[in-house]
Image (cartoon, rainbow, N blue to C red):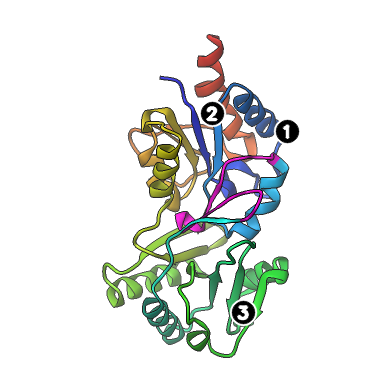
Amino acid sequence: MAIKLLALDIDGTLITSRGELTDRNREAIDRARKQGVHVVLVTGRRFGSAHMLLQELALDLPVVSHNGALTKDTRTMETLHLHALEVDTAHEIIRAARAHETDMICCCDEPRGPGKMVIEGVSETNVTLHRYIRKYKDALVEVSDLVAFVATPPIQLMFSGPCARMDEFADRLDATLPGRIRLFKTKYPAANITVLDAISTNASKGDSLAALAGQLSLGRHEVMAVGDNHNDLPMLQYAGLGVVMGNAEPEMKLPGFVETASNEESGVAQAIEKHILQPLTGN
């Protein structure tokens, strides 16, 4: 059966390592939409950091952000679905991060806004995180005590640092809060950086994609998902056709997935052309 819903990860998938959307990717998405295919971005990014790309592509479906924890309308910024962390759970995560001396960002929703990032300081050595918060400084709030600040359920807590250190911290969180949170890693081994997201057990890219497909009265066999990293696995496994990028780590290239070219080679466009456009045109 023809693909009617296309779910795309952003970083390492839709855009290049320089943050660029290639002309070939843009044109392939436009062609698929003209042939009636729904296109949705399903990202680990905050909604606010994905919004500019959303506007550039002029997509009309909601965007699934924060690894499935938050779904927002792309035009009104209205919050449609929020799977927030419980306050007590968030407090325990913050205390664990302090004990592990791990930098953190608390992400909070705004019902009709792009959301806020809240920090209580970042270590001087965490160059990558400093670069990130400078880029999105308009969304940044700094407080003296995150535990005191978090009085309502936040979207997520996120952490970044060297891969081995983030693996160690993830193990600590699993042991501290068994069954109470979901942890998703986005790994960049070449740069020795892992982004670790702690979200509600009710949230994942796969669950939110399934909910969206249901709202469109589509079955999973009508869904194609494209991704490159560990946090994409739930949606790749849900989709009738899971496409993994050529730049993904070897452990992501699992049986049952099909592989496309890298994000530097417009792998998204190649997948759309092969699995969506060619079957529709009969070429």
Label 1 crowd (10 A; few <14 / some 14-19 / many >=20): few
Pick the residue in front: 117 or 242.
Answer: 117
Regarding residue 252, the answer to whether it shows in the image is no
- Label 3 belongs to which residue? 125
| Amino acid type at mark 3 | Thr
Mark nearer the N terminus (3 vs 2): 3
Q: Residue at x 46, y 35 (%)?
A: 216
Q: Element at badge 2?
A: helix
Mark nearer the N terminus (1 vs 2): 1
Label 2 crowd (10 A; few <14 / some 14-19 / many >=20): many
| Amino acid type at mark 1 | Asp
| 258 falls in the magenta region | no
* Figure disc tally: 3
- State the separation of the CA atoms marked 1 and 2: 15 Å
**Residue 238: percent from left, percent from top:** 36, 40
- State the separation of the CA atoms marked 3 and 1: 37 Å
- State the separation of the CA atoms marked 3 and 2: 39 Å
- Left or right relative to 193: residue 132: right
**Residue 140: percent from left, percent from top:** 66, 74
Q: Quadrant of residue 60?
A: top right
Q: Nearer the viewer, mark 3 or mark 2?
A: 2
- Label 1 belongs to which residue? 23
Which region of the structure is painted magenta? Answer: 57-77
| Amino acid type at mark 2 | Ala
Pick the residue in front: 24 or 149.
Answer: 149
Q: Residue at x 57, y 24 (%)?
A: 36
| Quarter of the image where the C terminus is located | top right
**Tag 3 and tag 1, C-beta contact below 8 Å:** no
Q: Element at badge 1?
A: helix
Q: Nearer the viewer, mark 3 or mark 1?
A: 1
- Label 2 belongs to which residue? 271
